[in-house]
Amino acid sequence: MSLSDWDRDNCAVEKTLTVIGDKKTLLVLREAFIGVRRFDQIRANTGLARNILSDRLNTLVANGVLRRVLYQERPERYEYRLTRKGIDLYPVLITLMEWGSRHGELEEPSIVLEHKSCGATMMPHLACPECGEPVTAHDVRALPGPGATLRETA
Amino acid sequence: MSLSDWDRDNCAVEKTLTVIGDKKTLLVLREAFIGVRRFDQIRANTGLARNILSDRLNTLVANGVLRRVLYQERPERYEYRLTRKGIDLYPVLITLMEWGSRHGELEEPSIVLEHKSCGATMMPHLACPECGEPVTAHDVRALPGPGATLRETA
């Protein structure tokens, strides 16, 4: 069986994209990782219209990526914080940032990342958890997994 | 200056999202990384309508992520291959896959990845290129870089 013919119904990439697969949602997540939690500030930083932002926040809450937390009682005001599941999206944001830094024709980076434990200013890369070596597309072979099924053809 | 107030015009994440920030484009890239290069097969694997797929392919070619290569002369037929710039998007696809594997409630993976050099079946993770340690959101401090400018306020 070739991977070309595997049934895409069970695709992990597509599962993720059903939750975060649009630009506006990913800009909201950028703000969340920077620590911006309040509606009006997220709106100012993303330029999204109120109804669009409200829709994206509700979807992220419904999918367990953000949670609403009351921060003021009268009137009631909520802020949006990443859940554990949301924090696990950090690598997606980092890899989007890395590609934009390399290919986005920006003059200079507006954010730099510091690795707290070693102090290096760095851009994380993909590595193999077994041997620790850096991993690029050329270093990996994709194989059908236990959940792969051959697509039914008409 | 707090990162909350930095001017988002120079954002590397947003630069990337202007090129690949929609689900359909990312599904086309999934196919490209699996090695699926021809229009009809990409269409079958993504379920995209012809005009939508055509639009996404043209945009990816215009942005230098894919290139069109003639593979048949009469009639003329082209296939779509990743450029070097496109191959550099591999980490984005891997991190989307990793999150979907972890949180997408799939029963079993339909693809597994083998690290060619060490032979391990593995899921790449982010690591610090300086010290080699794994990197999560908790291990990193984001700081304003040389290109950061304070947003003008009204």
Image: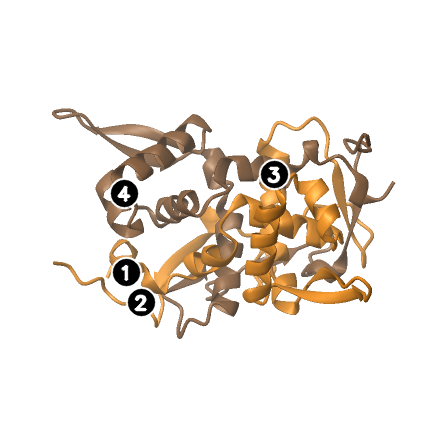
Chain colours: A brown, B orange
Rendering coords of residue A64 (x, y %): 45, 29
Label 4, label 1: how many angstroms apart (C-alpha)? 20 Å
Q: How far apart are marks 3 and 2 (CA)?
A: 34 Å
Mark closer to the observer (3, 4): 4
Q: How many other residues sit within 10 Å of disc 1, few (<14), some (14-19) or many (≥20)?
A: many
Point out the tag, 3 or 4, that comes first from the N-terminus: 3
Q: What element carries label 3?
A: helix
Q: Which residue occupies 51% across, 40% down?
A: A88
* Image position of B118 (left or right of B84): right
> Residue at point 51% right, 61% down?
A98
Q: What residue type is labelled 3?
A: Glu
Q: Are marks 4 and 2 in contact (CB under 8 Å)?
A: no
Q: Are marks 1 and 2 in contact (CB under 8 Å)?
A: yes
The residue singled out by tag 1 in the image is B6
Rendered location of residue A4, percent (x, y): 79, 45
Q: Do badges 3 and 2 share one subunit?
A: no
Within 10 Å of disc 2 (Cα), the crowding (few <14, some 14-19, many 20+) is: many
Res. B126 in view: no
Task: Work out how far the residue at label 1 is from the one at label 3, CA to CA, in angstroms.
Answer: 32 Å
Q: Mark 3 points at which residue?
A: A14
Figure quadrant of the C terminus of chain A: top right
| Label 3–label 4 contact, CB within 8 A | no
Comparing labels 4 and 2, the label whose residue is closer to the camera: 4
Q: Can residue A132 be seen in this view?
A: yes
